Image (tube, rainbow, N blue to C red):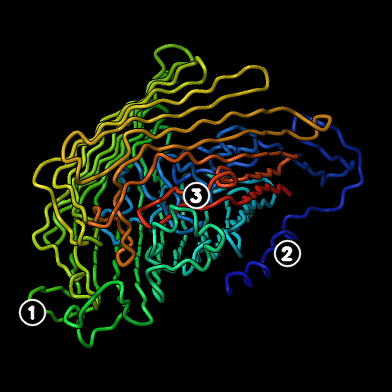
Amino acid sequence: MKYLVFLLLMIPVLIFAQRGKKIDSSITQNKDTLVVDSGKKDSLKIFKPTIQDYQYQTQFSEKKVFDTVMTFDKTYIFSQYNNRDNFGRVQFANIGAGFNPLSYEVNAEGNLSLLPTNKSYGILGVNDIRYYDVKTPTATFIYHTAMRNGAALQSTYTQNIGKRFNFAVEYMGLRSQGFYRNSLAANNNTLFSGHYISKSGNYELFTHYLHQNVNNQENGGIADNDLFQSGNSESNKENAQVNLASSSSQFSYRRYYLSHQFTPFNSEKFPFRIRHTLSNQGNKYYYFQDALENYWYTTASQIVTGFSPSTKKYSNNFGNTVSLVLDNEKIKLDAGVRYQMLKFGLNEIDLPLVDVPAELKENRLGAVGNLQVKLFDKFQLNSFLEFSNGTQFGNYLKTTNNIKFEPIKDYFVNAKVNFQSVYPSFNYLANSSAYRRFNYYLQDAKNQSVTEIGGSVNLKWFKSELFANYFRIDNYTYFDSSATPRQSDNSLNISQIGGDATFSYGKFHLNTRVQFQSALTNKELLPMPSFIGRANIFFQSRAFKNAAEIQAGIKVYYFSKFASREYFPILNEYILPTANSFSIGGQPIADLYFNMKVKKMFFFIEGQQIGTLISYNKAYAFPSYPVYDFRLNIGIVWYLFN
């Protein structure tokens, strides 16, 4: 609330500061600039901005223009509460509650930190933060309807103060009750960011503060799956019996970040810069229970006497990095040293057989490096390397290498070779719980090593893309069916191959995306569907005397039947199937939609899961967790360039 009051007080002052003097003289036009000449020496030049004057960037990267074009891919993005294309995932029956990842994903945000997997889908990493450069005060709003009572709204206000400093305030609030009992989601993000560059260009600064909360009631899934699959629970889902009555989970993610660089010498003669980065990131995960839940135990001996039903975990990562940067038109190279201070802690518990530590911490020293090469506008190389040494959390090594080149005009090849060797995510290391069987400490954990080799080819024909990926995971870390962390003795090998294409005939279009995948070894450790596919048939045209642009069509999402992992709410992680589990998938999810763009405003209107209007819903996100029924999903995206 205090941030909202501050924003409301500051916006009128800042907008007033942008106003110039009153002009009533003659005007002549020169490209996008209006030159105002009153015949006096204090003549003013007033700029008439175009869309090219509204740009954003991530830190130390090239600027991009605000995308206000109505393309078909936006229907995959702005119909989702996290404003991302969630192909390869299936959503719970409530927005803000997470997803079941149907294909293997590598999330670097979980490295050397506490990040429960099901809390990670809206988290903004350092390289996700946008810094703006706008000619006039600018605001954006992205709105989504919720599932029974509530809404999701993401708003951004940004403004340049002078030519060299920009600040932005962003807030996302989500509240959705959900279709089933005890499934309320309440998420919010608060972001303050700033970017400054000196008049000479010798000094540049990026800074931000981010606070994210992902809070959910946990109902443990529906109690009677036979009733759901028979269709007898269709009319009264909000009263359907669920497994948990008074449980909830909360995740808090907070980061302070500052990175700046200085050019001490003439950049044309000596293209060297000194870069310094400070970062402090704190993660907290809480699992609350008003009372012990009968679903988790059967006898009193399975309870830890005197231990609180609610638990807390936390991690903290402080980093201080100094780098030397070589920067010219074709090659950018920076290399430096990094100091880190890591902490991981949880509720202290005294057990005779499991020695769960209250806190683990260490100081680490390492090195980082980046290389970017651009040649002839045909070849790009981006490489990153980080290494650090530690005794408590092991050595850390990560490298990403991406190549993009254009062997033939309008045909692009992307290739990647990535590798990381890192301690398991801290949620796997230890847990304390009032339920005896959910206490663990993964002693002598080994680094989980992930090798990723893959690439894609973009073809001019049908705007198509072909892609293939291969993963080799050594010491694969997972939760077994009893929610105990394990590490595999043999490697897990995964292959993915697929493509994306758009076929057009006049104003009618068909976009398809397919992915075939398989675990080549240790299939039982990571169950996954062998096929994931999506088809979008739509009509797109100008309308209303060219005052608007419309899209109308139907989207179908499908994944083959498979024995999915189960969702485990105490950890917000996924465990191997239990004895009571069952297969999910094989049920198409179809959405009928109508989208419209008027000036800089988009309307996204979808009838989701239209198949449930004809037949009862039998689709699941996880065993015991159905996907949503038919709902009217409305999204609005509005760009306000003052």
Q: Position of residue 82 (x, y in %)?
A: 50, 51
Give yes or no for contact between labels 1 and 3 (Cβ–Cβ under 8 Å). Answer: no
> Of marks 1 and 3, which one's residue comes earlier in the chain?
1
Checking the image for residue 352, the label placed there is 1
Q: Where is residue 629 in the image (x, y as percent from the top left)?
A: 54, 52
Image quarter hosting the N terminus: bottom right
**Callout in the foreground (2, 3):** 3
Tell me if residue 171 can be seen.
no
The residue type indicated by label 2 comes to Pro
Position of 97 with respect to 608 (left or right) is left
Position of 540 with respect to 473 (left or right) is right
Q: Residue at x 16, y 41 (%)?
A: 522
Is 547 above or below relative to 275? above
**Callout in the foreground (2, 1):** 1
Position of 208 with respect to 294 (left or right) is right
> Of marks 2 and 3, which one's residue comes earlier in the chain?
2
Q: SS of the residue at dot 3?
A: loop
CA gap between label 2 and label 3 equals 50 Å
> Of marks 2 and 1, which one's residue comes earlier in the chain?
2
Checking the image for residue 198, the label placed there is none
- Please name whichever residue, 616 or 163, is drawn nearer the observer in this view of the structure: 616
Q: SS of the residue at dot 1?
A: loop
**Callout in the foreground (1, 3):** 3
Tell me if residue 562 can be seen.
yes
Q: SS of the residue at dot 2?
A: helix
Please tell me how crowded label 2 is: few (under 14), some (14-19), or many (20+) other residues with Cα within 10 Å.
few
Q: Where is residue 143 in the image (x, y as percent from the top left)?
A: 63, 54
Q: Which residue is drawn at 64% across and 23% down?
A: 508
The residue type indicated by label 1 comes to Pro
Residue marked by disc 2: 12
Residue marked by disc 3: 617
